[in-house]
Image: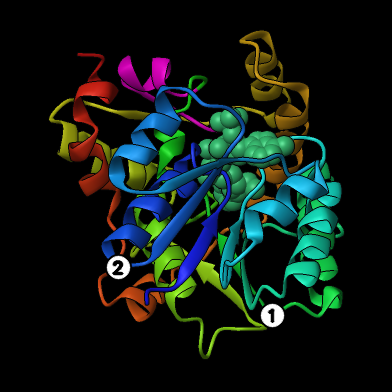
Amino acid sequence: MSKKVLITGATGDTGRAAVREALALGLEVRAMVRRHDDRSAALSALGAEVVLGDLQEVNTLRDAMQGVESAYFVYPVAPGLLSATVNFAQAAKETGLKTIINLSQRSADRESSSNSCRDTYISEEVFNWSGVPVVHLRPTYFLEWLLYPWQLPYLQQGILRMPVGKGRHSPIAADDQGRAIAALLKNADGYVGKIVPLSGPVEMDHEQMAAELTEALGRPIVFQDLPVQEYAESIAAMGVPEYIVQHLSGAMVDYQHGHMAGADNNVEQITGRRSMTVGEFARLHADQINGN
Ligand SMILES: NC(=O)c1ccc[n+]([C@@H]2O[C@H](COP(=O)([O-])OP(=O)(O)OC[C@H]3O[C@@H](n4cnc5c(N)ncnc54)[C@H](OP(=O)(O)O)[C@@H]3O)[C@@H](O)[C@H]2O)c1
């Protein structure tokens, strides 16, 4: 009999990818969503069992975890991460869950001025003291940043706009994280109790990233640096939620100080295939990035 796993955030970027990849690995997938809609119907069509649940409602988590061996935990950049973590750990203990795969972030840090970075650090600690076996994934910035509504309109005009100075990183696609999450849901031997960084294959600054985008898209993309405060005010004016603006105001300063630096090959170690490059991601999403 195949192993049954629970994937939360199944309508989000990493959760959706994890559902697809876990099914491809032959796992029996229960996908937790907040409501039935086109996105949940798409998960059913792939072969997942769709259940309703809310990370702020512990009883829905207990029900969603019945009969499940491993579960993926993800919470958006929004208020409520710590209560969601506690609910998840409590339900995991009640139901005898064997492994939690926790999506943390590279910049989890109790000293950060970002509320999200501090909460993410505490969330890892809460899972640790719950005693439920856990793997903490710490991805760097997602390549999906290129598609976020506050970035995409600039990119469509040829501008890679980020308040990051000469800070370096190796961005990672949600699809590659989905492959790693699915593999760890299937078998986390050797990873339980560890913090696992996840990144793309090549570390770069944003001048280099703009050059790679230029090459991949066949049109000039220019990096535009700007003060963090100016960036924060501009995205707030575009309607980005206050919690995300607060997070980025702190995280971008951390970024400039090297918190996102480095590249690792953990996706390849876990899945047998490396994560995609900036150019590969850009070609895959060229229509959207070009505004076609
Ligand atoms: N973006 C980055 O560059 C980056 C870098 C490092 C780490 N991270 C981490 O990545 C995480 C976000 O991952 P993601 O991009 O895959 O997420 P996402 O696309 O923002 O999706 C969030 C998912 O959580 C669901 N959700 C929201 N509130 C919920 C609740 N109360 N109960 C149950 N489900 C709920 C959403 O459902 P609905 O769709 O119905 O709202 C959605 O499926 C964050 O923790 C962030 O710190 C992000």
Residue 60, position as x, y percentages in the image: 73, 45
Residue stretch rendered in magenta on the structure = 151-163
- Check disc 2 and give the amino acid type: Leu
Tag on residue 256? none
Residue highlighted by disc 2: 25
Based on the displayed image, in which of its 4 quarters is residue 286 positioned? top left
The residue most toward the bottom is 190
Give the SS element for disc 2. loop
- Check disc 1 and give the amino acid type: Pro
Residue 233, position as x, y percentages in the image: 71, 16
The quadrant of the rendering that contains the N terminus is: bottom left
Give the SS element for disc 1. loop
What color scheme is it? rainbow
Q: Marks 2/1: CA distance? A: 22 Å
Tag on residue 133? 1
Residue 2 painted magenta:
no
